């Protein structure tokens, strides 16, 4: 088994944090995104979508998409449960993870990919207006998240879950996107400090 990884890129980091929380070690194969190694013929044969992370199993089969990889490891190693236990818990965690992807992580990615000079050859064409269009969406969602975090320690309830991983990675990705969490979002800031302080955050 090996995990194609992308260094500081956020999606591979989601998987590394997830594995660290589970206490699982997987051999890492670095992919140099800056050198556009993901677009090479060799890597395209692994993942035609030309993105990382990608997990290659011992039988040679391939699992791409961060959450699909995390779910594979959750099924094999259910403890600690990061996708929930029981119908309601699982649904609630899924709801928050999707909200954080759709309304926070992806809009932040759009800002980064459409404005950062390092992304010129990856995001073709870069559309700065699309970055601008996403900025108020990020601010709006942070307000919603802040209100919810007033009532509970973690994004989806009383326990740390995959939704916290998506949220942590998204918030940390605001820095290279030149965005900041508003001072008024005190609950988001408190929660972020807490999840960023876990050993897994350094993975
Ligand atoms: N939906 C995919 C997204 C993967 C993705 O966008 N990965 C980025 C790194 S964070 C990438 O490989 N970018 C290379 C490129 O855009 O050429 C997932 O969840 O894994």
Image (cartoon, rainbow, N blue to C red):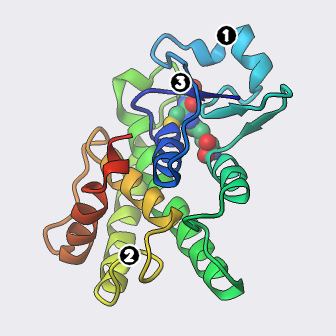
Q: Are marks 1 and 2 in contact (CB under 8 Å)?
A: no
Quarter location, residue 192: bottom left
Whether the residue carrying mark 1 lies under 8 Å from ligand 1 is answered with no
Q: Residue at x 22, y 55 (%)?
A: 180
Pinpoint residue 141: horizontal percent, then vertical percent: 39, 71
Disc on the earlier residue, 2 or 3: 3
Location of mark 1 (residue): 40
Front position in the image: 183 or 5: 5
Q: Nearer the viewer, mark 3 or mark 1?
A: 1
Q: Tell me the element at label 1.
A: loop
Whether the residue carrying mark 3 lies under 8 Å from ligand 1 is answered with yes
Pinpoint residue 109: horizontal percent, then vertical percent: 45, 45
Quarter location, residue 133: bottom left
Above or below 153: residue 203: above
Q: Residues within 10 Å of mark 1 (few under 14, many from 20)?
A: few
Regarding ligand 1, which quadrant of the image does it lie in?
A: top right
Location of mark 3 (residue): 122
Quote the CA–CA distance across marks 3 and 1. 13 Å
Instruction: Please say whether residue 56 is visible from this viewpoint.
Output: yes
Q: Residue at x 36, y 72 (%)?
A: 140
Location of mark 2 (residue): 154
Quarter location, residue 59: top right
């Amino acid at each position: 088994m090996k995990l194609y990884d992308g260094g500081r890129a956020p999606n591979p980091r989601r998987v590394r944090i997830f594995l660290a929380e589970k206490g699982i070690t997987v051999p890492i194969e670095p992919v140099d995104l800056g050198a556009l190694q993901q677009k090479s013929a060799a890597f395209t044969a692994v993942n035609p979508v030309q993105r990382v992370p990608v997990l290659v199993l011992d039988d040679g089969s391939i699992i791409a998409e961060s959450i699909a990889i995390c779910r594979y490891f959750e099924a094999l190693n259910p403890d600690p449960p990061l996708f929930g236990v029981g119908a309601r818990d699982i649904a609630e965690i899924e709801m928050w993870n999707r909200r954080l992807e759709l309304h926070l992580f992806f809009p932040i990615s759009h800002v980064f990919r459409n404005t950062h000079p390092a992304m010129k050859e990856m995001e073709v064409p870069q559309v700065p207006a699309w970055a601008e269009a996403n900025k108020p969406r990020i601010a709006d969602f942070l307000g919603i998240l802040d209100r919810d975090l007033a009532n509970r320690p973690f994004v989806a309830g009383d326990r740390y879950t995959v939704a916290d991983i998506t949220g942590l990675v998204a918030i940390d990705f605001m820095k290279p996107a030149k965005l900041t969490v508003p001072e008024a979002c005190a609950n988001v800031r408190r929660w972020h400090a807490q999840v960023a302080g876990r050993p897994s955050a350094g993975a």
